[in-house]
Amino acid sequence: MRNLGSAIIGYDLNDTYAQISYLKAGETEPETASLVLGLELFNIPLALYKEPGSNSWLYGNEAIKKDQPFTHLLGLAISGTAVTVEAEQIDPVSLLALFVKRSLSILTMQVNTDDIAAFMFTTPEVTPRIVEIVAEIALSLSLSPERVYLQSYRESMYQYIVHQPKELWNHQVLLFDYASHMKAFRLEMNKKTTPIVVFIESESFPELRYTADPSERQKKEWDEQFLLISGDLIKGRIVSSIYLVGEGFKDEWANESLKYLCQGRRAFRGNNLYSKGACYGAMEKFNPGELSKKMIFLGEEKLKANIGIRLKRNGLESYFAILDAGANFYECANSFELILDEEPKLSLIITSLTGSSVTEQIITLPGLPERPGRTTRLHIAIRLKSAAIAVLSIADLGFGDLFPTSGKEWSILCPLC
């Protein structure tokens, strides 16, 4: 077992708020840091404010009380547009990193933030730009890169649910996220595969839009709409449990719809599922348990196929594994060397986990010098541009003094589906 340090941190980051959960060493269930001791005030407004003429910055609730605070910090960081602060241009990622640093101060009484074992950020979606932003935040906070991770809300949902009692996810699971508007997520498992493949489908309902301080009439309309939506999603399916998350559920309007949802099913309402799921995800990354061996979650950012190369060893055709399905595309990379047989080409084998298909991509190397068989050594590096596109970087290394390198290099895009 690796040293767990003081705690594992799950950091929920979206464009409106942040939230921090933590899992102390030796404990099995995360806690969520509250802004007020004894109350479930988990959401930290994603805002900063600089006191004029000083280097003093306020964050969260203190910032939004001020005139013209900096808000939507994640969106600003994604855009990359510099922010003007007292006539000075500031990198928006630096502002976001400052917010993260200040917000971690609420953990002072719970854990030693100088000895964090693993730190998992979770965001609504994971894109290459978000990956860059998280890497920059980790660097600015002096967090060890090998202990900083990133996962989407969907994967945080998966991690949270499968760490609950099994009877709650024996069949399908529904999660309704009601923030700006209603979104539904359905978790399903293909138990016929080994390991079990888990995926999450989603659907959006923009007609059911949240507004603060709804009237009684509006609450009734929401309840009627939600009853229709949930009924359509459950019809013909066996659902073990249902989760309600988001600020929109706090107004106690879902009376008839909740009665329906709870008929033969367990229903839970809360606001810290994603940050707790981030903790569980970091725990599985840092100290993988039996769960990681039995299940693979295939989200949008996951590699959905095993990737390998067909080659010959001792005259026999064999398969050399390169990348394994189930990993985040931004974490997938490998490099190796091999000696070509007679032909100047490679055979890339793609074995899908979402179907029964096995495809072969033939990679040709135009301009490679003609040499006798097994006298060409190649250096091959592979990384993923997205979950569906691999980038192969290949260099001719020659074969010692007999066949010097030609200096030839190839960069090849390879579709994976």
Image (tube, grey):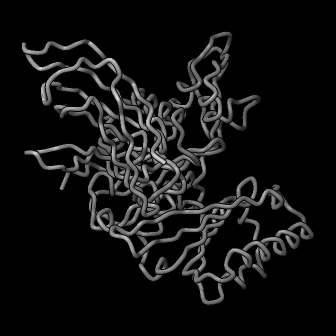
Return the residue nearer the eye: 104 or 223: 223
Q: In the figure, is residue 314 to the left or right of 366?
A: left
Q: Relative to residue 137, is residue 301 depicted above or below? A: below
Place of residue 24 in the rendered image (x, y in percent of width and height, measured from the top left): 33, 57
- In percent of the image, x 54 and y 32: which residue is there? 129
Q: Residue farthest to the right?
A: 217
Residue projecting furthest to the top: 87
Indicate the position of residue 304 as horizontal and vertical percent values. 43, 53
User: For residue 366, which quarter of the picture?
Assistant: top left
Residue 157 shown left or right of residue 279 in the figure: right
Residue closest to the eye, 18 or 403:
403
The image position of residue 68, as x and y in percent, is 75, 28
Who's the residue at 60% across and 61% down the image?
271
Image quarter of residue 394: top left
The percent coordinates of residue 400 (x first, y second) are 8, 17
Q: Could you tell me which residue is drawn at 22 percent across and 20 percent down?
A: 370
Locate the N terminus by quadrant. bottom left
In the depicted structure, whether residue 352 falls above or below residue 93: below
Report whether 220 appears left or right of 269. Answer: right
Q: Is residue 105 visible?
A: no
Q: How many numbered marks are there?
A: 0
Q: Where is 233 relative to 19, above or below?
A: below
